[in-house]
Amino acid sequence: APRVLSGIQPTADSFHLGNYLGALRQWVAMQDTHDAFYCVVDLHAITVEHDPATLRRRTKVAVAQLLAMGLDPDRATVFVQSHVPEHAELAWVLGCLTGFGEAGRMTQFKDKSSKQGTSGTTVGLFTYPILQAADILLYTPEPGEGERVLRVPVGEDQRQHLELTRTLAQRFNHRFGETFVLPEAHIPSGAAKITDLQEPDAKMSKSASSPQGIIDVLEEPGPMRKKIMRAVTDTGTEVVYDEEKKAGVTNLLRIYSALEGTPIPDLERRYEGSGYGQFKKDLAQIVVDTFTPIRERTLKLLDDEAHLDRLLAHGAERASRVAERTMETVRERVGFVGRG
Ligand code: TYM
């Protein structure tokens, strides 16, 4: 089977609707058709100031949510990044192949660092995309493992990081011999960038959005409905798709369409002449119906921490088998002396 690898940061108490539609839903679907590796990237989470106890809790909540969404630890390898030290090791090697200017052109770094001011920015935040490249390339399928494909399901905001990953893979192969496959970004067509409910021109984001702008997967139905009913819509009353003039309604239409599986033109027809109210009410119901079972399963999974720990140990072991093999090849190719 082709391979899939993706990661998510444990930087909030809950994942949000953008994470779900942009990435996590694809993770679940792809476990049936791919040899799947999914990691909670705690090393990435410390690139901004953090509290240790909070990070530990959020990492567990992240894992529980992934399982609650339907990832099956028998089919997919679910693991925590820091359990597999090869991620950091490969990042070092790739960092030595990355130009300083090349790293400086990453727009996410520019956005995040400008918010923190230069004194608050760390070298870790700067090299973040290189660690991400390592996350991905470590899971390059071995020659002879059949179809050598590596797909990476992510939202639109990760496109540039995927491009850098491909560049670094190519550069490594060119310098040291064919080692890595070039990973393919797998970005959903309709829901690649879900926007903030209060600021429909900005991405829904755990770090930048206000609580009113973001729908959390683990949120209670009451607040969820309220936020959707209060989502910024545009002047006018018609439920029509128009990215420029009706960014708010367009975002809600995308969410609706992705969750229900109904094409947008069908939704426009369904709500012709009925105004925003009914449309929002129905959408709120769909969101509540989607996330309520996930919230309930997450809470249940968090009740048995020992069970979660066992699943993670199992995931780490399976991920390590692949990562260790890749890293052995890398060490040999770059000229490190073997330990014998
Ligand atoms: P992170 O943790 O910020 O987000 C996880 C996933 O959710 C997607 N996403 C969105 N999609 C649509 N609309 C939105 N508003 C939205 N907000 C977030 C992200 O694109 C992402 O797919 N750098 C990564 C984590 C990472 C990673 C990796 C991903 C580390 N190593 C290896 C893939 C492969 C990140 O910050 O995602």
Image (cartoon, helix red, strand yellow):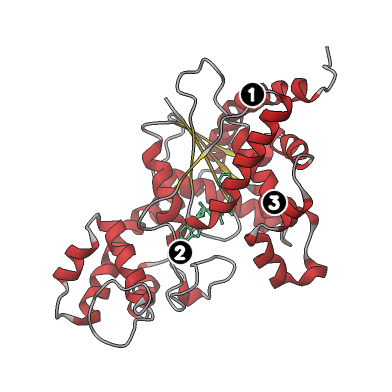
Quadrant occupied by the C terminus: top right
Q: Is residue 325 above or below residue 242?
A: above
Q: Residue at x 24, y 63 (%)?
A: 264
Does the beta carbon at disc 2 come under 8 Å from ligand 1? no
Quarter residue 140 falls in: top right
Q: Is residue 154 above or below residue 242?
A: above
Q: Is residue 285 left or right of residue 162?
A: left
Per the rendering, the mark at residue 128 is 3
Comparing labels 1 and 3, the label whose residue is closer to the camera:
1
Crowding at mark 2 (Cα within 10 Å: few <14, some 14-19, many 20+)? many
Q: Nearer the viewer, residue 166 or 28?
A: 166
Q: Amino acid at mark 2?
A: Asp
Does the beta carbon at disc 3 come under 8 Å from ligand 1? yes
Residue 101 appears at what percent x and percent y? Answer: 76, 54
Crowding at mark 3 (Cα within 10 Å: few <14, some 14-19, many 20+)? many
Disc 1 secondary structure class:
loop
Does the beta carbon at disc 1 come under 8 Å from ligand 1? no
Q: Amino acid at mark 3?
A: Tyr
Q: Residue at x 57, y 26 (%)?
A: 318
Disc 3 secondary structure class:
helix
Residue 176 appears at what percent x and percent y? Answer: 73, 25
Residue 313 appears at what percent x and percent y? Answer: 60, 32
Residue 275 appears at what percent x and percent y? Answer: 20, 82
Quadrant occupied by the N terminus: top left
* Label 1 – label 3 distance at C-alpha: 25 Å
* Label 1 – label 2 distance at C-alpha: 42 Å
Of marks 1 and 3, which one's residue comes earlier in the chain? 3
Q: Are marks 1 and 3 in contact (CB under 8 Å)?
A: no
Which residue bears the numbered disc 2? 216
Disc 2 secondary structure class:
loop
Which residue bears the numbered disc 1? 178
